[in-house]
Image (spheres, rainbow, N blue to C red):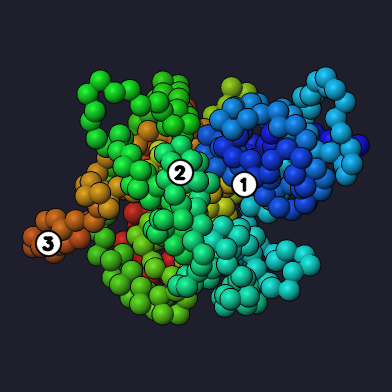
Amino acid sequence: MASQIVMPRMGLTMEEGTVVAWRKVEGQKVTAGEILFEIETDKSTVEIEATESGILGRILVKVGETVPVGTAIADLLAEGESLPAGRIPAIPQKAPKSKIPLAKLDAAPENLPALQGSKVKASPAARRTAKQLGVNLGQATGTGPGGRVVAWNISALGSITPAKATPLAAKAARDLGVDLAALQGSGPGGRITLQDVESAGRKPDVRSETHAGMIRPFTRIEQVMARRMVESFTSAPHFYLHITVDARPLVTLREQLMTKMENGSGVHLTYTDLLVYFCARTLAHHPEVMSQWTPDGMRLLNEVHVGVAVDTGRGLLVPVIRNADHLGLIETSRTLTDQTERARLGTLLPAEQEEGVFTISNLGAFGIDAFDAVLNPPQAATLAVGRIKEQALVEDGRVIAASMLTLSLSVDHRVLDGARAARFLGDLAKLLETPALTME
């Protein structure tokens, strides 16, 4: 009996999706578990697997069309079955959930259980990465708990072949007439990225170049970001707190841990990793900072899900590290690296960008000394981080040059008053100035 394939809901906030590719043609056999089509949401491009086997019938939503969640996009026929003439497709009321339950995303990728029925113990994130890069899981040496293969082990393999294209890159190649076989990918494992395709097609980056009289349509990510920022700035009364931190202990700690972590675990420790680690522990002692304003009252939260703003080249995304206060520094670094890479590749799931309670935006790598961030709704606080810079510091009556770091906390005044926000920022500064005590 014929069934219908519908636009799935890939996250709590997803309302519609755009079909960017069909992997099968009408009349072709479909096997459960294989990639059937790709969709683009306001947060990422996602490959969708077939949930059952059959024959692909009529494709009701063509490539490039956008439809609401739950809309029938194709028919799936049983073997030997044909559709009745003139049949009008229905629009189901509910869409199937993501293949990855939200509950499982609450854990770090390396702590997720291996899939049942598999001989190789690997996290779901590792399996997704292996599928994206065309890697045999058996090639990887697991460094996760119990020897489990994690995403970092897959992306660290240096001889991954053959190169594949991200969904966004494949779509751009079709639009620009670029031969993917002629490209050498710059992504993890040699994967072809959107930037590779645009460079080959001599498509200018109009986000950074000026073209007189030209109007470039906004990407879906840019549209959502703009709408959310306007809503945030006009609806939430912002105020800002600034503090300058003596970053010398933090610099020393990173230098001491970098070599050890890279040699022992293959982890490259960054200052953002350290900020996530210390912010998570400070938030756990200041749950009011994670509260959110609603028309019905204050939403109280106690799970420390920390978001990190990432520039993807197509707009700003905020991957969320769940239960960050329970992760060690190695796990924090691995998770952030994995999510950042997938955000830039366009394969980060929408559900991995939801339920954040606090956001960190670090522009230090761009040479910015300090800035004030717009709140990321519905969150009540965002931490803006500048670069670590040599500045004059008075110490024991002497003026010396010291590595200093400026932090700015953007706050929703409906949720937090100045004193509560100041206590949080002050405690965070103390942790950053005495990080060794926190690591014990």
Which is more toward the observer, 134 or 284?
134
Three-letter amino acid code at disc 3?
A: Ala
Mark 3 → mark 2, Cα distance in angstroms: 51 Å
Which is more toward the observer, 265 or 205?
205
Mark drawn on residue 173: 2
- Which badge, 3 or 2, is on the more N-terminal residue? 2
Three-letter amino acid code at disc 1?
A: Glu
Above/below status of 135 relative to 217: below
Residue 282, percent from left and from top: 46, 53
Residue located beneath label 1 in the image: 47
Residue 435, percent from left and from top: 37, 65
Mark drawn on residue 309: none
Three-letter amino acid code at disc 2?
A: Ala
Quadrant in which residue 300 is drawn? top right
Which is more toward the observer, 194 or 364?
194
Residue 227, percent from left and from top: 45, 25
